[in-house]
Image (cartoon, grey):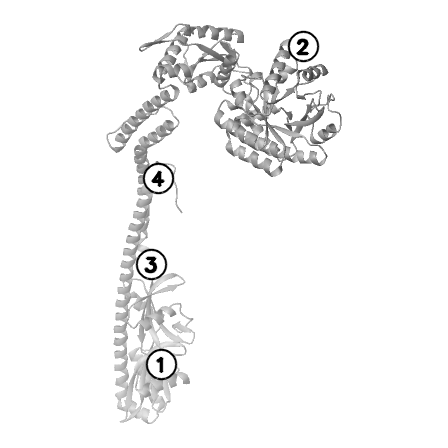
């Protein structure tokens, strides 16, 4: 697991303390290992030396006993008594010698197995064990268990002249003898004679010994060295020296043991002293490390805090308190912070100023306006900007804008002027009312009345102004600069010097823009449908054609004006998809009318933007050819002005394919006879502005009559739109008009309504809403 520190001071303190702690642990381990090893060596040496001493004592005692037994065994009278089986004499001799030799027991073991003892009583099993050992000739001295107690037994043969028995002296191996042996050692070890039994080694024929495992390992190793043993009292060092035994099935060993806890006892004070020294050293190191790390980390901490302040954009500087690496780092940081501050100042100036004129820019004006609770933003635009720019060049135009900005600033009492666009500058002014703001804007526009002298030329410029309130009346336009810009456009559209942003006139272009995506989805539903307005053939007095008009019932907005969504479709490039849908729907509805017994020509309005689209022309021709539909495409005369060659070529393709072409809204725009004679049109439609005033205005009547004559002279039929009164219809008949269209004939109807209308008379006033 990785430990993470948030503070370098803590990290250094913990690191140094950890290193010192590890060093102390290693020292303690080394000292403990050395002391323990030394203690083990000492104990091992003492055990070995004591074992050697006991072996010498054993040998010496065995020799002494053997000598005494031999004296008795060689006595002629004793041999005779043994040979004649004179038990009183033998027993008396044994008692006498036992007393002189000061041994625990003496006995005569006959070659035939009989036993005469003094001081000890041998049971048959013990006698048998002794006899087997002596008779086999494998042992003449060793450990003999008598009545469960170990004895050192030494024998001497009785020859008369052949072997007739053995004189055996026995010395009990009791605790007194072991204590005497322990006293010979320099360390307080424990000595005992262990004899083997079925359940393990026994101490002096007592309970099973806890050193049994260690004795077995010592005997198995055969190197006559102490081994380590685990006892109930802890770890101990054990030396096991085998002793000769008359019972081969129950070997005997001398065990010398010494607990290591006793060996380490003299060193406890040293360990406590080392522990105290370690704790004191650790405490001193902690305090010293803390002080040292604080001194080292204080400038680093200050640098860290300064970096955070610098990150937040605040001014940051640290004190240089030394000449080492940290001091140089602090100096470098201060230099870097200064460079960053200077660079940020330059970047901020660049971000808030126009690079050509040096004036503040739109961003600066937006920021300043956002801090103004009450005030107005006036945006001044250079009239005929493109014409002036093309005349004097881009560089000179920038100089002109800069000069006009300086004039406006001086005229406004030193208010700063910002360049918002290539040909527009703006400023923030304070006024008590909208009227005062407009009047001030008009007065400031007058600064352009004096020509501006540039390098090598004098330029006349005119200004218009748009005004936006800093607070309130945003009309859905969040930016006050944008509101002022829209006000500038509105002023120019109204041919005024200055205008305040009019939210009502601006409308909701953002909301209208979303209509197009909704319109594309609505084409797949019943929201969008085709309405048809009948066209009455005045000569046949019958309805021979209809004009297809698109209608849209929005689920939230209700009825949406065609002028709105068709105009938006033209501006967003969706007019083709809309027109293709209208063509397909008109063809489909014409088939329905034909099945109902009505043959009418479907007139579909074609946007001027599509008259230069060859692929749309291909679609329309393929759709008409595939269906055999009787269609007429209504276009405006001005639609061919932008790209006349392509537009006239497409119109010729329509005409050659049998698709009728109608010139719509004639007279409402800049009609050109030059284009009129080049367009292969079948029909000319007079705009309703002339027809609706026909029965009241002699001028309108003259214009309509001349247009009818013009159309007929060019080989076209004439259709009058906006026929709403019988008087107007009668006048049109008298003028020779071919077709009438208007509310007098019928309002736009859905397909079912159109079928019903076609079943009635040709001329019948309708007042139902479309």
Earlier sequence position, callout 3 versus callout 4: 4
Residue 106 in picture, x, y percent from top left: 33, 82
Earlier sequence position, callout 1 versus callout 4: 4
Q: Of discs 3 and 4, which sits in the foreground? A: 4
Residue at the image point whose x is 31% and y is 40% from the top: 285
Residue at mark 2? 696
C-alpha distance separating marks 1 and 4: 71 Å
Residue at mark 4? 11
Structural crowding at the residue carrying mark 3, measured as other residues with C-alpha within 10 Å and reported as few (<14), some (14–19) or many (≥20): some
- Asked if the residue under mark 2 is in contact with the one under mark 4, i.e. CB atoms within 8 Å, the reply is no
Q: Of discs 1 and 4, which sits in the foreground? A: 4
Mark 1 lies on a secondary structure that is: loop
Residue at mark 1? 248
Which is nearer the eye, 669 or 567? Answer: 669
Earlier sequence position, callout 1 versus callout 3: 1
C-alpha distance separating marks 3 and 4: 43 Å
Mark 4 lies on a secondary structure that is: helix
Residue 610 in picture, x, y percent from top left: 53, 29
Residue at mark 3? 262
- Asked if the residue under mark 3 is in contact with the one under mark 1, i.e. CB atoms within 8 Å, the reply is no
Residue 705 makes an appearance in the image: yes
Q: Quadrant of residue 414?
A: top left
C-alpha distance separating marks 1 and 3: 36 Å
Mark 2 lies on a secondary structure that is: loop
Q: Of discs 4 and 2, which sits in the foreground? A: 2
Earlier sequence position, callout 2 versus callout 1: 1
């Amino acid at each position: 697991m990785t430990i993470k520190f948030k503070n370098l001071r803590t990290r250094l303190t913990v690191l140094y303390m950890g290193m010192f702690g590890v060093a102390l642990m290693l020292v303690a381990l080394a000292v403990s290992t050395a002391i323990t090893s030394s203690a083990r060596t000492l104990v091992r040496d003492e055990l070995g030396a004591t074992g050697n001493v006991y072996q010498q004592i054993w040998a010496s005692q065995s020799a002494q006993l053997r000598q005494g037994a031999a004296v008795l065994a060689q006595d002629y009278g004793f041999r005779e008594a043994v040979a004649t089986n004179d038990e009183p004499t033998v027993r008396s001799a044994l008692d006498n010698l036992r007393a002189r030799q000061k041994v625990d027991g003496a006995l005569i073991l006959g070659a035939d197995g009989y036993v005469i003892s003094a001081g000890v009583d041998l049971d048959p099993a013990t006698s048998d064990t002794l006899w087997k050992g002596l008779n086999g000739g494998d042992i003449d001295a060793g450990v003999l268990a008598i009545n469960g107690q170990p004895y050192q037994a030494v024998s001497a043969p009785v020859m008369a002249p052949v072997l007739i028995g053995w004189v055996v002296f026995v010395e009990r191996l009791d605790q007194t003898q072991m204590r005497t042996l322990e006293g010979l050692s320099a360390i307080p070890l424990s000595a005992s004679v262990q004899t083997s039994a079925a359940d393990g080694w026994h101490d002096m024929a007592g309970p099973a010994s806890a050193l049994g495992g260690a004795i077995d390992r010592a005997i198995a190793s055969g190197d006559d060295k102490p081994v380590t043993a685990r006892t109930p009292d802890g770890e101990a060092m054990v030396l096991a020296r085998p002793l000769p035994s008359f019972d081969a099935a129950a070997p005997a060993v001398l065990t010398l043991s010494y607990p290591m806890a006793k060996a380490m006892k003299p060193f406890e004070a040293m360990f406590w002293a080392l522990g105290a020294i370690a704790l004191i050293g650790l405490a001193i190191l902690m305090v010293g490390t803390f002080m040292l790390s604080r001194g080292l980390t204080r400038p680093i901490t200050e640098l860290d805090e300064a970096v955070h302040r610098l990150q937040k954009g605040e001014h940051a500087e640290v004190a240089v308190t030394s000449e080492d690496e940290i001091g140089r780092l602090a100096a470098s940081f201060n230099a870097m912070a200064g460079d960053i501050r200077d660079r940020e100042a330059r970047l901020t100036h660049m971000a808030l100023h126009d690079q050509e004129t040096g004036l503040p820019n739109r961003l600066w004006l937006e920021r300043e306006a956002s801090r103004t609770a009450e005030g107005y933003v006036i945006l001044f635009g250079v009239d005929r900007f493109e014409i002036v720019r093309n005349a004097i060049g881009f560089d000179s135009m920038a100089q002109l804008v800069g000069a006009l900005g300086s004039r406006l600033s001086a005229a406004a009492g030193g208010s700063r002027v910002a360049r918002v666009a290539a040909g527009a500058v703006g400023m923030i002014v304070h006024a008590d009312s909208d009227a005062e703001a407009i009047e001030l804007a008009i007065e400031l526009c007058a600064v352009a009345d004096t020509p501006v002298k540039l390098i090598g030329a004098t330029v006349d410029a005119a200004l218009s102004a748009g005004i936006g309130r800093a607070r309130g009346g945003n009309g859905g336009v969040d930016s006050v600069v944008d509101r002022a810009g829209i006000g500038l456009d509105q002023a120019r559209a109204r041919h005024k010097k200055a205008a305040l942003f009019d939210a009502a006139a601006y409308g909701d272009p953002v909301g209208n823009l979303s209509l197009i995506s909704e319109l594309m989805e609505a084409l797949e539903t019943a929201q969008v449908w085709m309405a048809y307005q009948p066209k009455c053939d005045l000569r046949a007095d019958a309805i021979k054609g209809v004009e297809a008009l698109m209608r849209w019932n929005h689920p939230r907005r209700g009825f949406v004006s065609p002028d709105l969504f068709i105009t938006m479709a033209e501006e967003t490039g969706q007019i083709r998809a809309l027109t293709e849908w209208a063509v397909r729907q008109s063809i489909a509805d014409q088939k329905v009318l034909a099945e109902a017994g009505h043959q009418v020509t479907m007139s579909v309005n074609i946007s001027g933007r599509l008259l230069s689209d060859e692929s749309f022309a291909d679609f329309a021709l393929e759709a008409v050819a595939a269906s055999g539909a009787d269609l007429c495409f209504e276009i405006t005369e001005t639609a061919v002005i932008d790209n006349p060659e392509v537009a006239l070529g497409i119109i010729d393709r329509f005409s050659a394919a049998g698709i009728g072409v109608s010139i719509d809204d004639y007279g409402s725009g800049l009609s050109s006879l030059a284009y009129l004679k080049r367009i292969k049109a079948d029909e000319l439609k007079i705009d309703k502005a002339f027809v609706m005033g026909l029965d009241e205005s002699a001028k309108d009547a003259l214009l309509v009559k001349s247009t009818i004559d013009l159309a007929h002279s060019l080989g076209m039929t004439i259709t009058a739109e906006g026929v709403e009164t019988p008087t107007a219809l009668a006048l049109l008949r008298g003028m020779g008009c071919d077709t009438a269209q208007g509310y007098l004939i019928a309002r736009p109807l859905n397909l079912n309504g159109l079928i019903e209308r076609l079943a009635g008379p040709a001329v019948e006033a309708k007042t139902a809403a479309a």
